[in-house]
Image (spheres, rainbow, N blue to C red):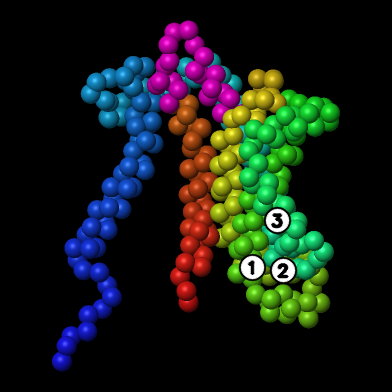
Amino acid sequence: MRTVRGDRPGIAAQAFYYVFLTIGAFISVFPFYWMFVIATNERGAASHIPPVITISDQFIANFERALDKTEFWTSLGNSLFVSIMVTASVLFFCSLAGYAFAKYEFKFKHFLFFFVLATLFVPQQLSVLPTYVIMAKLQWIDSYKALIVPAMVNAFGIFWMRQYISSAVHAELLEAGRIDGAGHLRIFGTIVVPIITPAIATLGIFTFMNTWNDFFWPLVVLKDRSHYTVQIALQQLFTTRDGLDYGMIMSATFMATLPLLIVFLAFSRWFIAGLTSGAVKS
C-alpha cells in the first residue's frame, strides 16, 4: 500500500518560511531601532562611518534640547486630542453609513455609494483651497474645528464598513431583532456592533495613524504655536542655523511615535482579525 502524505510542508520548507519571516521582521523593525540608537547618541552619530548601531546614554539630553526648541508636550496633547476626536467621529458616522449602504434599500442608493467611492480618486491637494475657504468663512482658521470637522467622515471608512457588514452581518439576525421589537439604533448597537468589532478596530487604527501623521493640512490652517500638532513641532527642529541635530530630532520623533505603537499594540488583536476576515473559510 502507498503511504498517503499529508498536506503539511516539509521541514526544509518550514525552515525557509521561518528564515524569510525573520528577515522580513528584522527589516521592518530595524528603522525603529536605528531611530532609537541615534536618539541615544551624540549629535553627529548619524554621519559616523561605520554607522553607529549601539545604544548610548544621551537620550534625555537630546530630548531636553528638543523641549527647549518646541512646545513638544503641548503639541503632543493637541495631536492626541485631534486624533481621538477624528477617530471617534469616523468610527461612528462611517459605521452607520456603511450599515445603511449594506443592509437597507433606499432611493439612489447605488448612485450615492458610487459618488462616495468617486471621492477617493480626488487628490487631497485639490480639496485644500475650497476647504480652506469654507473654514475661513466659518472663522475656524487656527482652531481645532478646522482639523476635526472636515475629517469626521471619509469615503474609505464608509467603503470599508459597508464591505465588512455586507459579508459579516446576516439578514436573519436583523430580522430577529425586528421581530423582538428592536428599533434601528438598538439593532445596530446590540447586534451589528459586536459583530463588526474587528472592522471598527482596523478602521480606528488607520484613522488614528493618518490623523496623527497628517502634516500638510495642520500646517495650512494653524497659526498659533500653542495649537500646533506634533508633526509641525517636529518640523521646527529642522529649522536651525547650527546644522541638523539628528540626536535631538530622533529623540523627539521617537517620543512622537510612542502613542502610535501603544494604540496599535492595544488593538492589534482586532486589527489582525479585521484584515484576515474572510481569508479562512469555515
- Residue at x 80%, y 61% (from the top left corner): 108
Distance (Cα) linking label 1 and label 2: 7 Å
Residue on which disc 1 sits:
166
- Magenta includes 32? no
Distance (Cα) linking label 1 and label 3: 16 Å
Residue on which disc 3 sits:
114
Pointer 1 local density, CA inside 10 Å: few below 14, some 14–19, many at least 20:
some
Asked which secondary structure carries label 3, the reply is helix
- The disc at residue 180 is none
**Location of residue 60 by image quarter:** top left
Tell me the mark number nearer the camera, choosing from 1 and 3.
3
Residue on which disc 2 sits:
103
What type is the residue that disc 1 sits on?
Answer: Ser
Asked which secondary structure carries label 1, the reply is helix
Farthest residue to the bottom: give it. Answer: 1
Residue 11 is at least partly visible in this image: yes
| Sequence-wise first label, 1 or 3 | 3
| Sequence-wise first label, 1 or 2 | 2
In this rendering, position of residue 261 left or right of residue 149: left
Q: Position of residue 240 (x, y in %)?
A: 49, 11
In this rendering, position of residue 106 left or right of residue 282: right
Identify the image quadrant of the N terminus: bottom left
- Residue at x 44%, y 26% (from the top left corner): 251
Q: Position of residue 212 (x, y in %)?
A: 58, 37
